[in-house]
Amino acid sequence: MTETIDTPVFELKGNIDRKYGEDSKLIYDLKDQGGELCPSDKEFSSLSGPSDPTVDKLDKMAWEDVKKEMVNEKSLSEEAADQIGEYVSMQGGKDLAERLLQDPKMSQSKQACAGLSDIKLLFSYLELFQVTDKVVFDLSLARGLDYYTGVIYEAVLTQAGVAPVSNETQQGAPAEESVSVGSVAGGGRYDGLVGMFDPKGRKVPCVGVSIGIERIFSIMEQKAEASAEKVRTTEVQVMVASAQKNLLEERLKLVTELWDAGIKAEVMYKKNPKLLSQLQHCEESGIPLVAILGEQELKDGVVKLRVVATREEFDISRADLLAEIRRRTSEA
Amino acid sequence: MEDKARVQEAIKIQGEVVRKLKSEKASKEQIDEEVAKLLELKAQLGGDDGKHQFVLKTAKGTRDYNPKQMAIREKVFNTIIGCFKRHGAETIDTPVFELKETLTGKYGEDSKLIYDLKDQGGELLSLRYDLTVPFARYLAMNKITNIKRYHIAKVYRRDNPAMTRGRYREFYQCDFDIAGQYDAMIPDAECLKIVHEILSELDLGDFRIKVNDRRILDGMFAVCGVPDEKFRTICSTVDKLDKMAWEDVKKEMVNEKSLSEEAADQIGEYVSMQGGKDLLGASLGPEKCLQSKQACAGLSRYQAALQLPGALQFYYTGVIYEAVLTQAGVARSPMKAAGYTSRRVPQRGAAVAEGRYGLVALEP
């Protein structure tokens, strides 16, 4: 059975040019943006290895630094910065939205009130969807992208080995005391984006979410490595093997029957493989069944079906073989 | 044969020359000149024995997926697609590159991370940065007013090497979007329900979904006295806010986890260091290492709080726990660099993520 691999879309330019010769002129080159993709750099990049995308906290800062950036770099007044500081430390659920609607300052903004009412409405639907246990209304969430116009959200895993210190709020999830390892999903409402493309500026409101699959892969890969469970890379159900020499023809005939019947099967690409090697291959690949052909069995019109896990063997008549294999593989 | 050895030696020396120039940030002309010399030398070798000397690596920020990784990936995709379908989504696909103008002006401060294709005399193109803008382009182009779609594909972001974030430059995104004029918040709530379902089904442990609203942020800025034109930029600054300042982390380690204050301070010192390969190696001799199992345990619990990117890999030798973070994802044992040779280091999987922080070595 074939396994599958995937390789990156971009390759070092040198590697590509050499491989494609005349066709090289059809290759799209990435613009030299001063990095490692610059052909003249390729041999000497001192960096090696891919990076682990698990965390993206490098750009997360403490409040003091955030405030400093707002005041010094973005010329915000200190009072404004302090006020923001007060608000962005708030987290909660529907109750927080309600409180803020009563907040003398916040309630001055029609915009904020509209947002707060929608958050309340959102939470009432989330209650019906039974997901409020994990959702927190967090005033410090400010996702950088320009195109969000309404609700924004971000999902974070709480486990960096840190158990969240529970601080129950009434209708939201326990406030997040723990620090996250980086987001695994994010999104929001973006009502103006399609209108930017439409020649007549017709608006199509949109809301969506993007799942951060790489982070998830990383975690699952680590989990797989840590666990004893073996990950199968093929789905082969039956290995067609021979117990003696000169049975290649019979093997090919039998595997053809299996393939035509939709059963996932394979043979060893050797005319006279040793039975032991074939069995070893099954153990390594996690193949559950072996259909063993032998001279005597052929004379008797049977095939020896071996269950790899238990090492039991059964003589099955050629006529019943498909049905038997199907039965065993469906039970699995 | 001798010639070949001589050429190889010359290549090594020339390679060092180039590396030195680069680290000294010499002029581009100088570097290019020396690089050309090196390429010439290498070409000589190539001609002689027909073997091409080229670099066997994937581009920075990209990776191959081997069969085991693909098997895991397939499982994850199946779970996610199953969820999307359960909620009635269809799927589309769009090209990897878009007209540059399509992507321009949509990503704010992140625009500098867009990959541009070289101007080769045709349309100016860029690799897609996400799947949302192509989606919007698709809707407008096809005059679609209502659709519920998912799209799983690779996107491209040119993270600046100087700001190593431990992120890939080519990576998958799984997007689910509902487009159309509907009554307030129902589709928005369903998106959150989908996130909840997926994260639960993938069994990744506990998670939280934070929500907020752009209008609340803008309103908040307004009542706090932020001038209109500063909204976006203040917004991105607020986005950087960490949840736990260093002082609180230290407090928790010392008070709740009974770590000695020196140990905590040491950790603090290390994690505030910024440096490259020079931070590791002999200069950080063993005397600078922490002698505390608790610090070790504390570190693993607070890796995110300490802003340590990626996975903190522990090299367990039976004698020494060593937490190593290095530049460029290559773990280098500082103990080894300091001259200690007795090590039993079982493989702990992929190399450690990029980091700018120092070494902490601990003894049980």
Image (spheres, coloured by chain):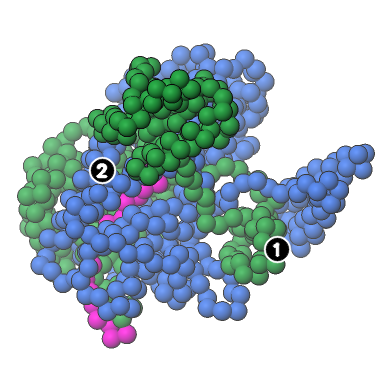
Chain colours: A green, B blue
Frontmost residue, A99 versus A276? A276
Relative to A324, is A272 on the left or the right? right
Residue A21: mark in rendering = 1
Q: Residue furthest bottom?
A: A200
Residue B157: mark in rendering = none
Q: Compared with residue B131, is residue B332 higher up or lower down, i.e. above or below?
A: above
Subunit of mark 2? B
Is the residue marked by circle 2 packed among few (<14), some (14-19), or many (20+) residues within 10 Å?
many
SS label for mark 1: helix
Subunit of mark 1? A
Amino acid found under the numbered disc labelled 2: Leu
- Extent of the magenta region: A199-219
Can residue B203 be seen here? The reply is: yes
Q: Name the residue carrying label 2.
A: B199
Q: Is residue A34 magenta?
A: no
Name which quarter of the figure residue A316 lies in.
top left
Percent of width and height locating residue B203: 27, 36
SS label for mark 2: helix
Taking the spot 47% from the left edge, 23% from the top edge, the residue there is A294
Amino acid found under the numbered disc labelled 1: Gly
Percent of width and height locating residue A138: 21, 50
Can residue B162 be seen here? The reply is: no
Taking the spot 57% from the left edge, 42% from the top edge, the residue there is A49
